[in-house]
Amino acid sequence: MIRLSQPEWREQEAAHADRADALTAGHRARAARAETHPIEDFLFTYYSYKPAVLRRWHPGAQVELAEGRAERGTWRWYAAEHGSDAVHVDAAAFLRERRALVEQVARILSRTAARPAQFGCFGLHEWAMVFRADERRHAVPLRLGREGTDAVVESHDLKCTHFDAFRFFTPDAVPRNREMLSRDTQADREQPGCLHAGMDVYKWAVKLGPLAPGDVLLDAFELARDIRYLDMQASPYDMRAWGAAPVPIETTQGKTEYVRRQREFADRSNALRRRLLDAVETARTAATASV
């Protein structure tokens, strides 16, 4: 087990809080003014995790925090050896209480990372969510108008592999997808080229709670934020009022730009998946050692 002195872990904790505050500053300021941002606020509404979740630093399993008992001794899923003033993440307790969740997360992460990335969807999931519909998920104008938007969907093959995007398809768009998706088959369909699967790495990091080291959590949030911008730039919505220039996937140039950035996100998301899987394995080792 790695032991951090109190000055060492206090410094890491403070740096983490500062980074989290910088990442959430815009959202918190808008919330205070009762304003919304259709791109960035998605990470706090769809995922519903408050900025405080990002701000709390955890070292991950197998790390001991010297003189941490007074502060973290009462934290859930933290423990101290008898007579010690140091604390560590109680991986055994977390796995006992949430083993099914941890195994589900690990299964999705590992299967997604092992699967070949697909780069032929061109972000059409957002278009399929407004196809032939009078209502839109965002109160933002359609860049090509109603008929132009529908024409793009009609002229393309829908290849969505992410159930949590597919479930928002309009009724007319559902049968156009290459395959029907369900929650039960999610782990068998996720692939690293999918933007939404990349954003979900942030969700999985949060669900792993204290097992996920703080830097991994914030890196996953940054990835989700960056992906979200491309997701909306390539969408049918006109996001220029929020500083997001269109990536017109209905054109050859737009498709090329989309795939270039999609490949970069696939690499970043897989790197984070491996780091989270390493954190889970470290927790399993720690739990076995404590028996």
Image (cartoon, rainbow, N blue to C red):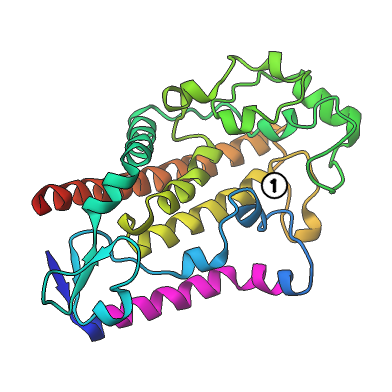
Circle 1: element type? helix
Q: Position of residue 143 (x, y in %)?
A: 84, 42
Left of 85 or right of it: where is 132?
Answer: right
Assign the N terminus to one quadrant of the image: bottom left
Question: Which one is nearer the viewer's eye here, 10 or 154?
Answer: 10
Q: Looking at the rendering, which quadrant does residue 12 occupy?
A: bottom left
Most extreme residue toward the bottom, as rendered?
7
Q: Position of residue 34 (x, y in %)?
A: 79, 68
Question: Which one is nearer the viewer's eye here, 243 or 196?
Answer: 196
The residue positioned 39% from the left and 80% from the top of the image is: 14
Position of residue 76 relative to residue 120, above or below, is below
Which residue is tagged 1?
Answer: 233
Q: Residues within 10 Å of mark 1 (few under 14, many from 20)?
A: many
Residue type, mark 1 in image:
Gln
Position of residue 159 relative to residue 18, above or below, is above
Question: Which one is nearer the viewer's eye here, 182 or 189?
Answer: 182
Left of 267 or right of it: where is 135?
Answer: right
Left of 279 or right of it: where is 27?
Answer: right
The residue positioned 58% from the left and 50% from the top of the image is: 47
The residue positioned 63% from the left and 27% from the top of the image is: 166
Number of labelled discs?
A: 1
Question: Which one is nearer the viewer's eye here, 74 or 122?
Answer: 74
Q: Position of residue 48 (x, y in %)?
A: 60, 53
The residue positioned 56% from the left and 20% from the top of the image is: 181
Q: Report the predominant secondary structure element of the magenta stretch.
A: helix
Q: Position of residue 196 (x, y in %)?
A: 55, 39
Q: Is residue 46 magenta?
A: no
Q: Is residue 15 magenta?
A: yes
Magenta stretch in the rendered image: 9-29
Position of residue 127 relative to residue 46, above or below, is above
